[in-house]
Image (tube, helix red, strand yellow):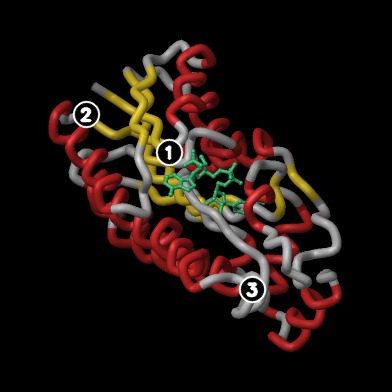
Amino acid sequence: MKIGLITGASSGMGYDFARLLDKEELDELWVVARRADRLEQLKTQCKTPVRVIAADLTKQEGIVQIADCLQAHEPRISYLVNCAGFGKFGDYTEISLENQLSMIDLNVKALVSVTQMALGYMDRGDRIIQLCSSSAFFPLPYLNVYASTKAFVQHYSYGLAEELKPRGITVTQVSPGWVQTEFFDGSQNDTSIHAPKKYSPMYRSEQVVSQAIRDAKKGKSISVCGTFVKFHRLAGRFAPRWFMKSQWRARLK
Ligand SMILES: NC(=O)c1ccc[n+]([C@@H]2O[C@H](COP(=O)([O-])OP(=O)(O)OC[C@H]3O[C@@H](n4cnc5c(N)ncnc54)[C@H](OP(=O)(O)O)[C@@H]3O)[C@@H](O)[C@H]2O)c1
């Protein structure tokens, strides 16, 4: 049984990955998030049978739920998409320690756990897609912990891609700029005076996701959608840190 396993599929880019991977002749789509009702909606959107795994991936029990399901059905994972993630704006006083650690639990620990588990069910030609972010391109004060989790995903994905070459499994990190999703509903603390003045340019989720799937099929190690973000990536590599910091500061409230 060939499946697509997608975390964070109850909204935003994860939801669109599920809808677009529906075209890939898979036997099942396994979708993971906490909001089961949202995941159930995908059954009406997709012709591929959808298996709902309602799980909180910041908790060990959530990871075990996926492990149990994999053990019980022994699928071949043709596509793994790690989309579950969240971010918060603010300085170190504005974001509680609980939220800071929760970002690390979800964006880093859960992503590594799910990837590691999935690799036991993947083979030549299969694809891993990791949701990274343009915030990984350089240090970002006031989005610091979130951006640092994405810097981890960036390095981890490049390294894993190399390790998996002999097995013929590709790893594509998707590094979008701002994307119109529910991400922004939870990202801005009421008290935060450090959020961006405006989110521009703002990309459409489907645009980012369809490019990500195309790039994953080509075996690219990174998928970057939009000229602005491509420029941002180059600047992150070649411009001095003080310059990038001043550009970012100018965009904040
Ligand atoms: N939007 C942007 O501007 C942007 C830019 C760059 C990168 N990204 C990254 O893209 C990925 C997808 O985000 P999005 O923009 O599509 O945002 P979104 O619409 O808020 O989607 C986030 C997904 O993560 C799931 N999730 C959150 N906490 C979870 C938990 N504890 N356990 C399991 N699932 C959890 C949510 O489902 P439940 O709430 O139902 O659990 C939801 O399905 C994230 O990794 C994000 O960091 C976003």
Q: Is residue 225 left or right of residue 149?
A: right
The residue under label 1 is which amino acid type? Arg
Q: Which residue is mark 1?
A: 34
**Left or right of 199 on screen, residue 152:** left
Amino acid at circle 2: Pro
Q: Which residue is mark 3?
A: 94
> What's the distance in space between the residues labelled 1 and 2, CA to CA?
22 Å
Q: Residues within 10 Å of mark 2 (few under 14, many from 20)?
A: some
Q: Is residue 239 above or below residue 184?
A: below
Q: Nearer the viewer, mark 3 or mark 1?
A: 3
Among the 4 quarters of the image, the one containing residue 244 = bottom right
Proximity of marks 2 and 3: CB atoms separated by less than 8 Å: no
Q: Amino acid at mark 3?
A: Glu
x and y percentages locating residue 99 in the rendered image: 50, 65
Element assignment for label 3 = loop
Q: Which residue is tagged 2? A: 75
Q: Using the rendered image of the protein, determine whether residue 237 is visible from the camera's viewpoint.
A: no
